[in-house]
Image (cartoon, grey):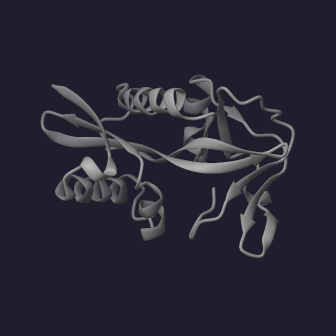
Amino acid sequence: MIELMTAHTSDIDRDVLYGARELLGEVFEGDMSPEDWEHALGGVHALLWEDGRLTGHASVVQRRMVHRGRALRAGYVEAVGVRAGHRGLGHGAMLMDAVERVIGGAYELGVLGASDEAVGFYRRRGWQPWRGLLSVLTPEGVRPTPDEDGAVFVLPGAAPLDLAAALTCDWRDGDVW
């Protein structure tokens, strides 16, 4: 039996959050830093259980993106992962359905940083690669982030977008995109 739950970080039991953190450590083979986990907190989580075992996680948190002179309210997708042995069964799609519903209802656009392995998955869901200059608004000012070219995807919503123009994200510790 598959069960999907969505809830704000504040409404999730600490043991469940700990389990999600452990799951993601396994999914990303130890490449999930404390900052990466922190980025996934403070928004809405989608948690997927199969036969009582946590098998998938995704979250969406609010971030600000500056585009064409406007600060846009973006739903930023974080920490999407499905346990090995459960991939290719539609679990990732169920998680993304949940976070995309939140994005559509609460944000002007969706944004995420995609791993090379996930690019096709996101494209098939209608996410589009950002083609313009990417940058981050740091405490010292705007800094280009060329290493992220081709990895940042958006899900257009209410805000008019020019995917070939510049997009600047807000500052945070760890990976900014």
Is residue 54 left or right of 134 when viewed as pictured? left
Quadrant in the picture for residue 84:
top left
Is residue 71 left or right of 14 when viewed as pictured? right
Q: Residue furthest left?
A: 52
Q: Which of 124 and 133 lies nearest the eye of the viewer?
A: 133
Residue drawn at (36%, 35%) of the image: 87
Q: Residue furthest front?
A: 70
Counting every numbered tag in the picture gives 0
Quadrant in the picture for the N terminus: top left
Relative to 37, is 48 above or below? above
Residue drawn at (68%, 45%) of the image: 152
Give coordinates of residue 70: x percent, y percent: 78, 44
Q: Residue furthest bottom?
A: 140
Is residue 65 left or right of 3 when viewed as pictured? right
Give coordinates of residue 81: x percent, y percent: 40, 45
Relative to 137, is 130 above or below? above
Residue drawn at (66%, 39%) of the image: 153
Relative to 133, is 140 above or below? below
Give coordinates of residue 166: x percent, y percent: 84, 47
Is residue 18 left or right of 167 when viewed as pictured? left
Quadrant in the picture for the C terminus: bottom right
Q: Which of 12 and 112 lies nearest the eye of the viewer?
A: 12
Residue drawn at (40%, 59%) of the image: 29
Relative to 121, is 165 above or below? below
Give coordinates of residue 115: x percent, y percent: 58, 47
Q: Which of 163 and 87 lies nearest the eye of the viewer?
A: 163
